[in-house]
Image (cartoon, coloured by chain):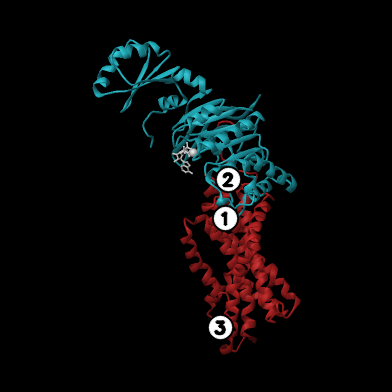
Chain colours: A red, B cyan
Amino acid sequence: MRKGAPVTGYDSMIRLSWRFLRVWLRDFDSFRKYIVVNLLGNLGDPVLYLLAMGIGLGRFLGEMQGLSYIQFLAPGIIASAGMFAASYECTYMTFLKMFHLKTYDAIIVTPVNIEDVVAGDIAWGASKALFSGALMFAAVTAFGLVHSWWALLILPIVLLVGFHFASLGMLVTTMSRSFDYFSYYFELVITPIFFFSGIFFPLDDFPLWVRGIANCSPLTHAVTLCRALILGRKPPHTWLSVAIIALPSIVLFYTSIYRMKKRLIK
Amino acid sequence: MGNAVSARGLLKKFGDAVAVDGIDFDVREGECFGIIGPNGAGKTTTMKMIYCATPRTSGELSVLGRDPGDCPEEIKKDLGVIPQENTLDTDFDVITNLLIHARYFGIPRDRARACAGELLEFIQLSEREKSPVDDLSSGMRRRLLIARGLMNDPRLLILDEPTVGLDPQARHLIWDKLRMLRKASVTLLLTTHYMEEAAELCDRVAVMDRGRILAIGPPGELIRTHIGEEVLELVLSSEDQERIPGDVQHHPARMEITSQKCLLYCEDCRSLVTHLTERGYRNIHRRPATLEDVFLTLTGRDLVE
Ligand SMILES: Nc1ncnc2c1ncn2[C@@H]1O[C@H](COP(=O)(O)OP(=O)(O)OP(=O)(O)O)[C@@H](O)[C@H]1O
Ligand SMILES: [Mg+2]
């Protein structure tokens, strides 16, 4: 037993363990239960983008970077589907579980600590991104837009994108007081990222500073990677791009766990 | 026998507000220990420090021989926690709630299934196995929470207001279950606002108020030391209220006057009743002293906050 002095150890340490998998499994079970809703919800929007913009708008646009417009668009839609799925999962859904359904309260009285709960939810967000990305990938394949086996590497890229945006979403959730915060987050952060990551138009002709900002966005790099891979080409800076997605996510991951613990364990 | 919980100078602050103010107590292994106290007394906060959901600010705390600050997961694997509010997982049905909870403990699937079946029997919810938890009545949810807390075969069961909002039938059912657990030598630690619940179930009770423990002991003993054997309740008119202090001053009884009533705490009230009847008082109600008298005497009759 510790004597005298104030107790701090428990507060400041991050006690992550493999038990986070049990939290992931809980989310997976819930997902399986609502599988039909999940399938429809995940395919709807992106397929609509592909049809409306790729085919509809594409008729007027002609070629872009030597590609048909739909071919240009499709890889970015796959990557962004991952971003949206992970972001949604670790903001709205996590907030719901945390405050309204008290799921977190129920779990932290078991050997699963709060760190594991947060890590499990982030892992789930990333998995959900992979799921959405894979569905989109299948749809894009059905449109005949996949031209190489290298395209399968898009899936791990989407998983990485998912991990990045799940961690970022979780960090936003640690600061959020209500669902309104998430509307701001989606409008002010996620949507601009979606439109300025080179999904809909190439960034080459923009001024340097615009390209500079866009190149800080992990999604820009994911889109570049996916666009090359789907054609079987070698991406311009493969490892640099991967690092720009992955390294910040590790920081975001630990920061969000730390902040969530601070917020919930008082 | 050792102590399941041992606290010395246990203190908890939220910012500058002191929620638990340096309390000392032990919960012995195998006993049922109750904490009673008004709203905001610090009961839930004390429980949360014990089940490792909130760190203490200072003092010493040992739960099942370990420090919650050092190895929460080791302690939590032997705890059953029934929280004050409903934390059932609304995404799942009754049985799945139990199975998923068991998985958090790493209990193998078949063992969890067998255990869940037995527990549903125990709380009489077998028929509702497949009901979504939202469809249950609040009494059923409460029972399910108890079953969930028992899935890992805990050594220490912590119940924060286990019977709040239940009808008498449901309350008696839960009391029976808790007595059975106590016989099976599970240590029970509970809080309650129902004095008869504490008196009925607990071997020892701590009366808590504003973060401090005011008294601790077996319910019967607390009643004898703080109140005595019996209580007289008198309904008084205003002139009776004026004269009663003079009329009882030669009797060894402690008096308390509230807006409508006068309470007299005495060892043997018979002679006092005779005396008061002779002096012309009517509506004298004589009854045994209860834990509620102890509670109200120690924590005051006014609403705290
Ligand atoms: N997370 C928190 N942040 C700030 N203050 C808190 C927090 N939790 C509890 N408190 C304060 O600590 C004090 C004790 O609260 P606690 O919940 O332990 O009381 P209680 O005895 O369980 O009351 P009740 O009978 O109403 O359940 C209260 O003044 C409460 O406002
Ligand atoms: Mg409470």
Do we see residue B99 in this rendering?
yes
Please, which residue is most extreme toward the left here? B239
Task: Sort mark 1 into few (<14), some (14-19) or many (20+) by Cα contacts within 10 Å.
Answer: many
Give percent across and percent down for residue B131. 61, 52
Q: CA distance from mark 2 to mark 3?
A: 48 Å
Q: Nearer the viewer, mark 1 or mark 3?
A: 1
Amino acid on which disc 1 is placed: Ser
Query: Does label 3 lie on the same chain as label 1?
Result: yes
SS at badge 3: loop
Task: Sort mark 2 into few (<14), some (14-19) or many (20+) by Cα contacts within 10 Å.
Answer: few
Q: Nearer the viewer, mark 2 or mark 1?
A: 1
The quadrant holding residue B234 is top left
Residue B288 lies left or right of residue B67; in this view the side is: left
Q: Which residue is mark 1?
A: A256
> Which of the two discs, 2 and 1, labels the residue nearer the N terminus?
2
Amino acid on which disc 2 is placed: Ser
Amino acid on which disc 3 is placed: Asp
Residues marked 2 and 3 touching at CB (< 8 Å): no
> Which mark is drawn over residue A12?
2
Q: Which residue is mark 3?
A: A205
Do we see residue A6 in this rendering?
no
The quarter of the picture where the N terminus of chain A appears is top right
Chain of the residue on which disc 2 is drawn: A
Query: Which residue is painted at 64% across and 64% down in the image?
Result: A35
As drawn, B204 above or below A228? above
SS at badge 1: helix
Give percent across and percent down for residue B106. 71, 46
> Which mark is drawn over residue A206?
none
Chain of the residue on which disc 3 is drawn: A
> Which of the two discs, 2 and 3, labels the residue nearer the N terminus?
2
